[in-house]
Image (cartoon, rainbow, N blue to C red):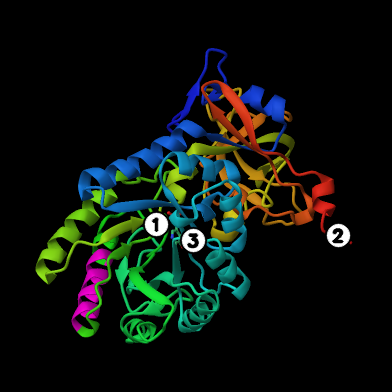
């Protein structure tokens, strides 16, 4: 059996192990369902990105962890220790980061419809950059900054016309997106021209994010090229030097055997080369580069442990293997048809000679976690691990059916520590009046 997560091994008891912890024991101690994260992998991923900025771009850049992938205090503490910045997309993420003592000046605030309250919160707490999405936000921010006698340092979110939402990419108009301002219609240039007339706005750079789970380098090279071309145009037209280029996140990870992600350092290598060439060609000073990986920092560091409940065999149709979690802790299959690899924690090497549909416990027929999982014969009570659930799982979890959210357990050097406790029924009732 090949695991899609590099941090998994089989220990001397024949059980699945991560971070030096026997996952059967983790399940027994903390109960299931539970998210388990390998802290060493998270830190190592941060270091790979940071080293790549040093090695390929002389350190003239910043890696931001896109905290929508997994937002909790423990993660912001790790990012702080690893010297990364973070991007946040809501007041809630910003609040969590600040509560974890994350330095405000290394926080970038994204979002296509930030509320007035959120912008005030960001300004009052001195976040490093606000990534402005549209003209309404620009004017609102200028007013709020003026009222506080502050200058907001901003980047504009640009639609560069590169669509990389699939395994390949296309260069298109792609103006049909709710995020950002378009280059090709002149909207991006117009918003910059307008920003230059505003008293409490300082435009320091531009940003784009071209998609997620991308396995190719060319879309990033192309995005860098397009964005630098725009920077040169802004310089030539308005005499404005934009010193910062933020190329977003989107680097792919391995969910299933067939996924072939590129080594993370390759992104910076490719982008650096393009930036050097284009800056020479356009006679531009090389900008400060910012990248925003989310999924690729945490996804392959995490798995979800479930306990197998009923196994329902429907002759000539399929076998449903139901677990004690489901779409409330993992809505990705029902939302995107995402695929996963599963392992039985106490039989990780047994031949996978049955095919089952792993179903959740929610009151929806579509509450499926894996359509066709190849597993050894399972029994009720077995512990099932679904791999690569470290990103966009806890952060997308809900209380659907009033199911409490699972805990997050960090494992490292043989120790399992609770990072987020399991929700209780009282927590769920917390806001009910
Ligand atoms: C603006 C922005 N930056 C970064 C990311 C992180 O993307 P990923 O988790 O795919 O690296 C996203 C994801 O949606 C995003 O919208």
**Disc with the residue nearer the chain's start (2 vs 1):** 1
Residue 255 at least partly seen: no
Q: Disc 2 versus disc 1: distance between alpha carbons?
A: 37 Å
Q: CA distance from mark 2 to mark 3?
A: 33 Å
The one nearer the camera, 383 or 371, is 383
Residue at 46% of width from left, 30% of height from top?
7
Identified at 68% across, 53% down, the residue is 367
- Left or right: 267 as drawn, with respect to 348: left
Q: Quadrant of the C terminus?
A: bottom right
Residue 326 at x, y percent in the picture: 68, 47
Circle 1 residue: 249
Which residue is disc 2 drawn over?
Answer: 432
Rendered view: 276 above or below 414: below
The x and y percentages for residue 10 are 50, 21
The segment highlighted magenta reads 223-236
Q: Which percent across, then down, holds residue 415?
A: 58, 23
């Amino acid at each position: 059996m090949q695991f899609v997560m590099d941090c998994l091994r089989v220990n001397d008891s024949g059980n699945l192990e991560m971070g030096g912890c026997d996952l059967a024991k983790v399940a027994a101690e903390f109960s299931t369902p539970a998210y388990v994260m390998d802290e060493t992998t998270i830190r190592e991923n941060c270091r790979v990105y940071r080293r790549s900025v040093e090695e390929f771009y002389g350190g003239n850049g910043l890696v931001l962890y896109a905290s929508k992938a997994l937002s909790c205090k423990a993660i912001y503490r790790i990012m702080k220790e690893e010297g990364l910045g973070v991007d946040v997309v809501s007041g809630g993420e910003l609040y969590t980061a600040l509560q974890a003592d994350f330095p405000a000046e290394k926080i970038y605030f994204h979002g296509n419809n930030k509320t007035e309250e959120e912008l005030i919160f960001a300004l009052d707490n001195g976040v490093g950059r606000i990534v402005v999405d549209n003209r309404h936000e620009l004017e609102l921010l200028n007013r709020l900054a003026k009222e506080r006698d502050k200058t907001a340092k901003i980047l504009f979110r640009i639609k560069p016309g590169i669509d990389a939402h699939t395994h390949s990419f296309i260069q298109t108009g792609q103006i049909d997106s709710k995020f950002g301002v378009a280059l090709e219609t002149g909207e991006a240039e117009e918003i910059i021209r307008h920003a230059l007339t505003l008293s409490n706005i300082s435009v320091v750079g531009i940003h784009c994010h071209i998609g997620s789970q991308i396995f190719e380098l060319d879309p990033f090279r192309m995005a860098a090229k397009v964005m630098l071309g725009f920077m040169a145009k802004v310089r030539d037209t308005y005499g404005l030097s934009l010193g910062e280029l933020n190329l977003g996140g989107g680097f792919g990870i391995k969910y299933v055997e067939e996924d072939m992600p590129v080594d993370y350092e390759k992104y910076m290598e490719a982008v650096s080369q393009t930036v050097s060439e284009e800056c020479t060609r356009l006679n531009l000073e090389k900008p400060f580069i910012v990248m925003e990986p989310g999924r690729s920092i945490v996804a392959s560091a995490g798995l979800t442990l479930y306990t197998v409940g009923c196994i329902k065999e429907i002759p000539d149709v399929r076998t449903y293997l139901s677990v004690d979690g489901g779409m409330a802790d993992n809505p990705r299959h029902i939302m995107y048809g995402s695929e996963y690899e599963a392992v039985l924690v106490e039989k990780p090497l047994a031949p996978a000679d049955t095919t089952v549909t792993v179903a959740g416990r929610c009151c929806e027929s579509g509450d499926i976690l894996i359509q066709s999982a190849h597993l050894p014969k399972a029994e009720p009570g077995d512990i099932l691990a679904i791999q690569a659930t470290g990103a966009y799982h806890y952060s997308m979890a809900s209380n659907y059916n009033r199911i409490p959210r699972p805990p997050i357990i960090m494992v490292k050097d043989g120790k399992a520590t609770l990072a987020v406790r399991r929700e209780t029924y009282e927590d769920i009732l917390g806001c009910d009046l």
